[in-house]
Amino acid sequence: MTPENNAKKRRLHFEIFRYNPEDPDSKPHMQSFEIDELPYMSLFMALNEIRETQDPSLQFDFACRSAICGSCGMMVNGRPALGCRTQTSDLPELIRLHPLPVFKLVGDLSVDTGTWFREMAENTEAWVHAKEAFDSDAQEERMDDELAQAIYDSDRCIECGCCIASCGVANVKSDFAGPAGLNRVARFAMDPRDTREDSDWFEVISNAQGVFGCIGMMACHDICPKELPLLEVYAYLRRKALSSLFAGNKDRDHAA
Amino acid sequence: MTTQLVNTDVLVIGGGLAGERCAIEAAAAGLDVLMLSLVPPRRSHSCAAQGGMQAALGNCVKAEGDNPSLHYLDTVKGSDWGADQEVARIFAEEAPVAVRELAHYGVPWTRVRAGKNSYFVKGERVDIDEQPENDGLIMHRDFGGTAKWRACYAGAGTGHAALYAVDSEVVRLGVTVRDRAEAVALIHEGGRCWGAVARCLRTGTHSAILAKATVIATGGHGRIYGQYTTNATINEGTGASIALATGVVPLGNMEAVQFHPTALSPSGILVTEGCRGDGGYLLDKNLHRFMVEAEPEKQELASRDVVSRHMAQRMRDGNGVETEYGPHLWLDVRHLGEDHLTTKLREVWEICRDFAGMNPADELIPVRPTQHYSMGGVRVNKDGQAYNMAGLFAVGESACWDMHGFNRLGGNSLAETIVSGRLVGRQVAKFAADAGLEVTASIAMREVRRAERHASAWLQRDGSGPGVYAIRDAMAETMIGKVGIFRTQDELAEAVTELEQLLAKCDQAVLKSKVPGMNPELSFALRLKGMLRLALITAMGALARTESRGAHFRTDYPLRDDAKWLNRTLVRWPDDADKPVFSYEPVGLLDLPPGHRGYGSDERIEMDQSIEDYNATIDGQQAEHGRLETEESAGSRIRWGEWGEQR
């Protein structure tokens, strides 16, 4: 994004998917809107302008508008992206917006990612399985900063759903844990505070719902708005699955 | 949301850090907990906290000798003596445990690396050897207004990491979460709260949730400043609004509004104080580092209210960089280097790239002070119970507990969420375990019908009235223009008039969209009146308070006045009244006598009574204002005079 790009005044043409499941008269269709492009305009600004000046019934989700809450995943010209950090200056004049696939539609561009991610968290038991109860008198358990950094890097997933929407498997197989789910598994698997052993993880990931369900197209890796190294995450989990089969060791080496 | 009536032990309204930590406490006690959240809990605005969480662990060299007494001292000074000192003491004592508990939940805190580490301190690069015995403990970074490095952090995504860890406990404990749901009214009778009416933001339908204990944890209300805030779009003060709508629960210190020094200009997106904590500078248009002469001792790391005022003054004096979106100043972190910026400040690096199209390793970051935090909120006692309403609690930013007084220190709110969540959660659990659900379904359904009528009135109203977004925009311009960093009698009086007019207009406003289901315009319209009321009482409170304290700065009354204004503003809005009612209670028991903060102005008007005389009246006066009885007596947690050993 540069001011030069914005210097040429453009008229943006939006085609937006519309459907309100709560309205018996509503039928799925594309609706056109036009607005003037402004300097530094994001889809957050553009969609709010459309809603506030042209069609107040338009549904979409934004919260933080700074690419950290993960609310605003949507298909932007066929590619999953966060609406808030997508600048119109990076797009052609024709901008087609659809809701993310895979997730249940709430209405228009709004989808129910909350239910999907809660189920995923329950299915993979995505919490630290602690050795013992918290001791409020004890100093914190030590951790090497390198490892803390690696866990943090993996923990940075914001559950926006863009990887799920981009995933060829998740689009056709509803029980596939998906890139975000498997990344979550990897995050806990590398955490020494979690007592689950390789054999426990084997049950979760070494099947078609888990890491071996992936057919390797890796669109997730390309589109992840937080640039998580999903390629490495999958490699780490495959290796972990195999190491538990052959060696049954409890190595805690983490993803590169 | 098909059932119209649901019973639970504990209803938590809001799925951010404070609400979730509170829910964990109640669920772990075996109670049935139901949580309402506008968004999936992990999307709550807690996730946007970046730089750190204050807790006096004292783990690194620059934190040596730190302890809760020092944290307490910094917090009270930061508050400009507006805080309840007992609450500040409880907070400082409990913060280390709460932070370590988060490590237990899985937060990947940045850790101490033994051996040589390079830091920036007051503009100088210094090499410091971290001790081997501290290797692997939770690391600290510097933040504003603190005597020691105290902020614990996970990169620049501390809030995100904390929220995900806490939410994973919520999932583990099986807490029922209704996301895309909003509490639109409290169900209460005779000074006892019995839950809330919930509006489903998928379908637009209403239901009653009856609860033995109800917790408001809805965060701040920065959106009364429209786009001129770092807050998320969801921070519209829904919890404070429904508490005010009871007619009896007071809100505290609504005029205490924090402006964060470094929001990205013009988008208003937060850039963490950790940038300055790690050694970043503020520069004016001439690339002059003006904070060094403005605050020789603390420089860029004075408290936020002080730094924001110096910045605003610098821009008023014509030393800002002029743009079509107004002036800004520069934040310079180039000297920290790309390695540091892409790890310990990674979220800042990404925000600069994604929202300003620049690389902070090579370029200056355009910043300006922007509304950031609501010190005011639902007034509660030290157990977190709302004044005048049994069974109602509040935690986190939506509450006025009140450890922040008139200015909150950076990193203290993130710590408050989990400290107050733990402590208040315990009180909530006790309360609910001992209580029965003694409310009739008819009262609940009456409230549901009232909410339904309210919504359908909006849908039925036709005519040529103003639109809801136009009213919102007018509110925002009034608030930023007249209830901002520098305040005066004339501008505040104008603001009050304008906001009163907007409130009147709100009743004539007309929706353009009448679609069924989750009608986004209707959803906003249903919050608008509450937001306008919050805005109005903020302006009225600021107009009435003829002194300057913390973030509330009156250019016509520039001194802190401890003779007249060492008190907390309380405001209620009685049923059917067209105006709110203001009253004032003492700030709480004084342990640390009012004095100089160590930064900012040293001029003030002294108290005209002794501390003993002041303290003698507090219990009675606060009880008169509706403070409910606490488990322990007033002052039980104060460690009288212990701060003296820190001098």
Image (cartoon, coloured by chain):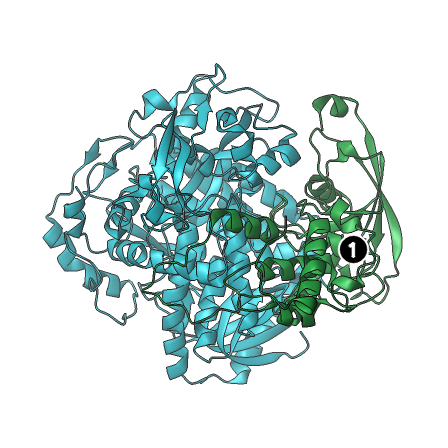
Chain colours: A green, B cyan
Residue A69 horizontal/vertical position (percent): 61, 51
Residue B181 horizontal/vertical position (percent): 61, 65
Residue A47 horizontal/vertical position (percent): 74, 44
Q: Residue at x 59, y 45 (%)?
A: B472
Q: Is residue B397 visible?
A: yes
Q: Residue at x 41, y 24 (%)?
A: B313
Q: Specify the farthest residue to the top.
A: B286
Instruction: Please state the total of marks drawn on the protein image.
Output: 1
Q: Secondary structure at mark 1?
A: helix
Q: Which residue is mark 1?
A: A165
Q: Residue at x 37, y 83 (%)?
A: B434
Identify residue type, mark 1: Ala
Q: Residue at x 68, y 44 (%)?
A: A227
Image side of residue A12 versus residue B186, left or right: right
Image side of residue B122 versus residue A50, left or right: left
Q: Closer to the camera, A237 or B294?
A: A237
Image side of residue B459 versus residue A17, left or right: left
Q: Quadrant of residue B177?
A: bottom right
